[in-house]
Structures are given as structure tokens and as C-alpha cells.
Image (cartoon, rainbow, N blue to C red):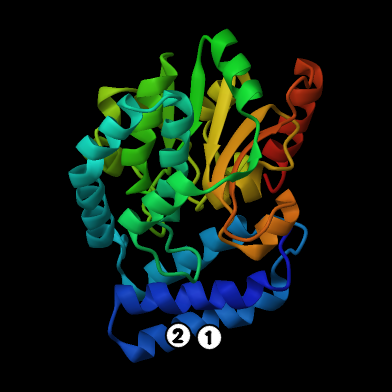
Amino acid sequence: MKTYLDCLPCMLQQALRTGRIATEDERQIKQILDTVGTMIKDIPMDRPPTETGNIIYRIIREITGVADPYKDIKSANIREVQVMYPDLKRMVNNSRNRLLTAIRLAIAGNVIDFGVNKEFNIPQSVQQIIDQDFAILNLELFRDQLNRAGSILYLGDNAGESVFDKLLIEELGKPVTYVVRDGPIINDVTMADAVDSGIHQVAEIISSGSPAPATVLSLCNDQFLKRFDNADMVISKGLGNYESLSGVNRPIFFLLKAKCHLIANHIGVRENDIVLKALNIGVSINDRNRSINKYRNQEK
């Protein structure tokens, strides 16, 4: 997915919001905005906005000296969802369609997002999404791929969301590798966050190697790229991963809430719709690998 003009003011808003979380020093916040504002003219519009996000958050770290501005917020989100976990688990257990309910809850967790300019309430969002119709629901393709899969690669998104991911992983019934960011960026899930959420109890956890707020293949490490090449099934959570991977000619299942109108338009749904979208199912291995290598080698 390319960068759109409407992404540019959003980037400045993210920089301002995160700067204020990182520091109360108005001079440092102004320096962040000056630096980000100056770089806007050089942003490559043909590349995903998550690649620019990586640069913006590096600027914030360098100016404020704060490596993980969202650390306390992430911990609070994880604790809040863990309190809800027994009720969420009962909801899955009592459902007539356990897999679909677990998918719904995994998408409900996608609302915990500080990369978009929207407020959220976790319990309200869970109830709303339980009652909400899917705009795209490729459930039968998902079931078919799941039944045939020997290995599943699950690309995580936000820290609090990972507790919801655990519910879905438990329903998949297959060996799962859960992928996290290489280091703190926004409120995205890191290795430490995933362990706090209990993901290590149900899946192997690895880092993608990407410091960006998404799975940017050109920034990923060799261990992840090998898993990405060879996994029988890839499940991708959230907007950032969609931005970075929607152009890769590889079978992927995207689970997300379309919180951004640009991404909603790109998918072909309305803003705030929920989506389980299958992409490139039936693509040959040779075509898949050619596309992956193209994205992997960009900017190297």
C-alpha cells in the first residue's frame, strides 16, 4: 500500500501525541515537530507509510531519550484485558462457532491502537464487534487453509491485543509461531509484551527483526524471512501489517478493524468495518517467492 496525502497530517499528529507521552519539555516536542515537518517533503509516496513511521519514532527516541514512551500504557492495556480473559474464554467456549467467535475477539483487540487518532474503550469495543457484521468474511477459505496447514505464522500487532490473539491461537489447534516487533515502537507488541500476555504458553515467539510499526520485509531478519517463506498459513493482524504486506503476492489472511478511511477504501469496505480477508489464495510458490524477494530487496 502506498502513502497517501492524508497520511502526512496523521504522521504529524502521531509525532505530537507520542512526543507528549515521552516528555513534558515543550522545546523537545517542538524539535520533534520541526524535524518531522522538514522530512515530509522527502517522504516516498510510493512506499507504505509504516516505513516512514519507523523514521519518525526513531527521531522521537533520539530527541527525548525515551526508548519506550508507551511502556506503562502497554502494561495497563495487557492487565485490563487479562482481567477480561476468563469471561472472553467462556464466550468462546459457549459459542456455537468457536473459531468465528475467537476471530471476532482477535479483531476486537485491534481497537487498542495509538497509531490512529481515535479513542477507544476495550469492553465496549468487544461488545460492539461481537454484534457487528463482517464486511468481508472469508471464513471457509480460512478453515480450509487451517485444516491443511502444518505450521502457522501469526503476525502480532498491538500489545494489549496479544491477549485476544491468545484466544484465537488456542482455537487454531496447530503449531503457531507468534511474531513481534524487534523493539518498542508505538504500543506494538514486543517479546516482553507477548510474554506478559501469556503468548509463550500457546506459541513460539520470534522477532521479525523489523523496527518499524509493521512487518516491513526489507527490514526483517533472516530467521523471520525463512519462516515467512515456508509457513503453510500466515495470519496478519492490524493496519500496519496490512499497509506493508497487502502488495506481497503471498497467501495471507488479514484480520483487522478498518479504523483508517484510507485503508478501508483500499480494502473496499467502510471505515470501522471488521474484516477477515484472504489475499492471494491459490498463488503458486514460484510467483509467491518472486514477489516476496522483490519487497524484501527494496531499500537494501
The disc placed on residue 34 is 1
Q: Is residue 218 above or below residue 176?
A: below
Kindly report the distance in space between the C-alpha atoms of the residues bearing marks 2 and 1.
5 Å
User: What residue lies at 51% left-to-right and 77% top-to-bottom?
Assistant: 13
What is the x, y in percent for residue 5?
73, 73
Label 2 with label 1: CB-CB less than 8 Å: yes
Which residue lies at the image location 72% right of the left edge and 39% below the top edge? 295
Residue 174 in sight: yes
Q: Quadrant of residue 163?
A: top left
Residue marked by disc 2:
31
The tally of labels here is: 2
Left or right, residue 134 beside residue 23 = right
Vertical placement of 121 versus 10: above or below?
Answer: above
Up-down relation of residue 295 to residue 128 (above or below): above
Locate residue 106, reporting x and y percent: 43, 39
Q: Position of residue 291 (x, y in %)?
A: 77, 32
Residue 86 relative to residue 31: left or right: left
Bin the neighbour count of mark 1 within 10 Å (Cα to Cα): few under 14, some 14-19, many 20 and up: few
Left or right of 247 in this view: 235: left
Q: Does dot 1 land on a helix, a strand or a loop?
A: helix
Which amino acid type corresponds to the residue marked 1 in the rendered image?
Asp
Q: Which mark is residue 10?
A: none
Left or right of 168, for residue 39: right
Q: Quadrant of the C terminus?
A: top right
Inspect the image, locate mark 2, and give the three-letter code of the amino acid beneath it.
Answer: Gln
Coordinates of residue 221 in the picture (x, y in percent):
52, 34
